[in-house]
Amino acid sequence: MDLDDELIELRRQIHRHPELAGEERQTAGLVAEQMRAAGLEVTTGVGGHGVLAVLDGSADGPTVVYRADMDAVDAERNVLFIPRSDRVFDDGFASRVPGVAHLCGHDLHTAIGVGVAKTLARSSGPVPGRVVFVFQPAEEPLKGARAMLDTGLVQKLRPRESYALHCAPFPSGTIVVSPGHGLPGLDEIRIVLPAGDAAAVAAEVAELGTVEFPRSVADYHARFHSVLEQHVPESVSVGQWTERTSDGQPVVTIMLRVWPQERLPELRVRIERIAARAGGHVEFAGEPFPALVNSAELSTAAGQYLSATTGPESVLWARASWPYNCEDFALFLKEAPGAQFYLGVADAESGMNGAPHTRDFAADERAIGYGVRAMAGLLTHRLTAQGTSTSLPGV
């Protein structure tokens, strides 16, 4: 069995046995077993069920991080703002865990991370530095990256750059590079009202939004592809719902996804004014979660390398940030600059939409091998580039 086939089977094993955020015991154990078998130094239980696997090459070379996430989602509650279709793609190896599924592609991300590690470990020449493979739990609630980083183990290895992939509804065999763009930050805010109907307050908050949520899978596809065609300097998406406190007070809970991050203070002030006019008050859940910002220089360098090695037709260039999701790889990028790429996993001919967080999400598994070869080559290239340059970043 060649490596591509091994990784497809690994992906299917993870896909059949999905685990929610914070419960990734089986997936983490499987990853750790694969990493030890490949000869990497493995640490488990990092920030929960996180796995840290270190591939040592040249002792005096630089260090880069490659991150993959492992958690699945609640298949009923964690479907993105899109009406559920009647059809669910039959991939032949569906989840065996009721109500839990890999609808965001983290099973593919994990298989690709394992594949990159195996490829580099099996390479004929020495790796010109060190690669730290981070298999992260609890990405969906935006908790796993912080938990792993709070252990200090990643920082101790002094990485200079960080990279990751995420599935997306682009054609299989393509990769999207987003220099200077990324994903919005997230702010959770509660408006507590004295009494009465919260509908007017909710409507006023909704007017802060500059982008509407997609209304169908086709709309989702079209908007995702629009990032290739238009530069949108600012975007605000507003998610909200109304509840009541134990003593009956109406509460409007707001989830703001904002790009760029610098707009958040202004929006907080505007929401406070809306609450004050209604006689209510605002409660902030904490500090906003940071936006994921790809390094413009390193993203461009990666895109140039991938275009040269895989063909310019395989590399797409984003001109805007996708406004509807957040991603806790943002915290790794704050420790060491780098980029998250979109890996195309859609295959229209076979009905695989490649659209994460949709009920009928399905991915072309041939994209796994493409992602492995692209990332293994890129990481080797980046280590070589850093090792021959005293500046950071280097091209």
Image (spheres, rainbow, N blue to C red):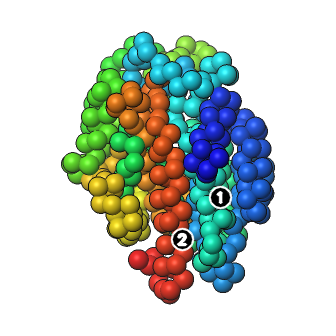
Q: CA distance from mark 2 to mark 1?
A: 13 Å
Relative to residue 160, is residue 208 depicted above or below?
above
Residue 59: x, y in percent?
69, 81
Q: Position of residue 213 (x, y in %)?
A: 33, 29
Rendered image quadrant of residue 199: top left
Question: Measured from the top left, where is residue 286 in percent x and y?
Answer: 56, 44
- Name which residue lies at 47% across and 52% down: 370
Above or below, comparing residue 27 to residue 304 in the picture:
above
Disc number for residue 118? 1
Q: Amino acid at mark 1?
A: Lys
Q: In the rendered image, is residue 239 in sight?
A: no
Q: In the picture shown, does residue 68 fall above or below 374?
A: above
* 42 relative to 199 in the view: left or right: right
Give me the residue at 45% from left, 76% from top.
393
Residue tagged by mark 2?
Answer: 380
Residue drawn at point x = 67 percent, y = 34 percent: 13
Left or right: residue 20 compared with residue 327: right
Q: Nearer the viewer, residue 197 or 309?
A: 309
Give the number of the disc on residue 139: none
Task: Give, as a three-letter code, the residue at label 2.
Answer: Thr
Q: As drawn, is 120 to the left or to the right of 227? A: right
Asked whether the viewer can see residue 171, the reply is: yes
Residue at 51% over, 35% down: 104
| Observer-nearest of 387 and 89 | 89
